[in-house]
Image: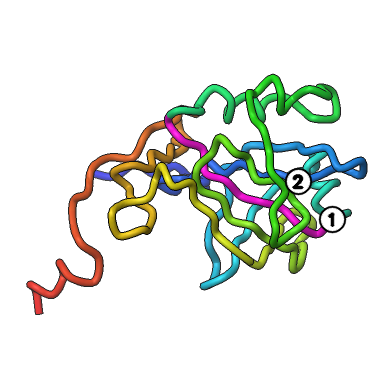
């Protein structure tokens, strides 16, 4: 037996994306967004309502996307519930420091270990921000012996949309483009 829930944004897992921009004075701001994902090899789309971050994004046509992690759950949730328009020390209160991206005019949040640096390509239907990924940067603390991002070291969280909770990701359970070959 199955239960119907109607049209709901129940995608599991949903990444917890931290979108960062600069305002007109060059001050960094960030927000938490759950409705976003990769839509091409070098493109990301994020659905955002009206925020200070979206105003900044439209002006600078650049943004970064960092992934919330287990270590920074409280800070990442905070930037999602407090507006930079009302709280001028939002980044400081979150405990976030930033470095300017060398690829786009947007801040990289130093405390979050993996960041995509993006330029705005288009705004679709007034709220869907399509970005071109210009670079991905990762802190060495989340790199494995092979020099790439290691899920054994990087601990991103996921948003659970039914109960509005965060979860860490679990252990590896298979190998993509390999395990299904046993059914050939």
Residue 31 is left or right of residue 4, and the answer is right
Along the line of sight, the residue nearer the viewer: 75 or 164: 75
Q: Indicate the quadrant where residue 42 lies.
A: bottom right
Mark yes or no: residue 146 visible: yes
Q: What whole-number distance in Å separates the C-alpha atoms at marks 2 and 1?
A: 8 Å
Q: Are marks 2 and 1 in contact (CB under 8 Å)?
A: yes
Residue density around tag 2, few if under 14, some if 14–19, many if 20 or more, within 10 Å = many
Residue 24 is left or right of residue 50, and the answer is right
Along the line of sight, the residue nearer the viewer: 15 or 74: 74
Q: Position of residue 96 (x, y in %)?
A: 64, 30
78 over 26 or under it: above or below? above
Judged from the image, the secondary structure of the residue bearing numbered disc 1 is helix
Along the line of sight, the residue nearer the viewer: 157 or 93: 93
Check residue 21 in the rendering and tell me which mark sits there, or answer none: 2
Segment tinted magenta in the rendering: 60-70
Q: Indicate the quadrant where residue 154 lies.
A: top left
Mark yes or no: residue 80 visible: no
Residue 23 is left or right of residue 76, and the answer is right
Check residue 120 in the rendering and tell me which mark sits there, or answer none: none
Residue of label 1: 60
- In the rendered image, the quadrant that contains the N terminus is top left
- In the rendered image, the quadrant that contains the C terminus is bottom left
């Amino acid at each position: 037996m199955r239960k119907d829930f109607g049209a709901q944004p129940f995608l599991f897992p949903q990444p917890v994306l931290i979108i960062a921009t600069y305002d007109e004075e060059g001050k960094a701001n960030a927000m938490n967004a759950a409705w976003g994902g990769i839509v091409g090899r070098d493109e990301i789309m994020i659905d955002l309502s009206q925020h200070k971050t979206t105003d900044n994004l439209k002006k600078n046509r650049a943004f970064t996307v960092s992934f919330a992690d287990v270590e920074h759950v409280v800070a990442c949730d905070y930037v999602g519930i407090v507006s930079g328009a009302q709280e001028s020390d939002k980044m400081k209160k979150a405990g976030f420091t930033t470095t300017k991206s060398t690829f786009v005019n947007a801040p990289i949040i130093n405390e979050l270990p993996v960041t995509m640096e993006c330029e705005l390509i288009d705004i679709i239907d007034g709220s869907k921000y399509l970005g071109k990924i210009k670079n991905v940067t990762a802190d060495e603390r989340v790199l494995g012996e092979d020099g790439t991002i290691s899920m054994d070291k990087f601990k991103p969280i996921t948003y659970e949309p039914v109960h509005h909770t965060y979860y860490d990701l679990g252990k590896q359970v298979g190998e993509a483009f390999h395990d299904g070959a046993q059914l050939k």
